[in-house]
Image: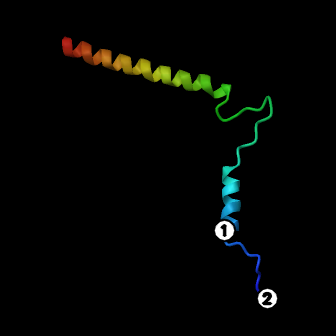
Amino acid sequence: MADNDYDPAGSTQMFRAFVDETPAPQAPGSVSTYGSTGGGRRTGVIALIAVVTLVVLGTVVWLAVK
């Protein structure tokens, strides 16, 4: 017996509805991926890289002038 109510686009529509759903809001107090606990460490690493880069560039300029 054939199914006369079959919608071939139904699975596509359900998939799109699933993908387009907005993520549920997080509960207060929960730590997200980009929470405040990792921000300080990331900032410290970036600052360290900047300082090392400045020291290396300063050394190169000093050797070039010398």
Coloring basis for residues: rainbow
In depth, the one of 17 and 44 nearer the eye is 17
Label 1: which residue? 9
Q: Residues within 10 Å of mark 2 (few under 14, many from 20)?
A: few
Distance between the alpha carbons at the discs numbered 1 and 2: 21 Å
Is 21 situated left or right of 29 in this image? Answer: left
Label 2: which residue? 1
Question: From the image, which quarter does the N terminus lie in?
Answer: bottom right
Tell me residue 14's x, y (percent).
71, 61
Question: Mark 2: which amino acid?
Answer: Met
Say whether disc 1 or disc 2 marks the residue closer to the N-terminus: 2
Query: Residue 28's image quarter?
Result: top right
Is 42 situated left or right of 12 in this image? Answer: left
Question: Mark 1: which amino acid?
Answer: Ala
CB under 8 Å between discs 1 and 2 = no
Above/below status of 3 relative to 30? below
Residue sitting at x 49%, y 24%: 46
Is 21 situated left or right of 57 in this image? Answer: right
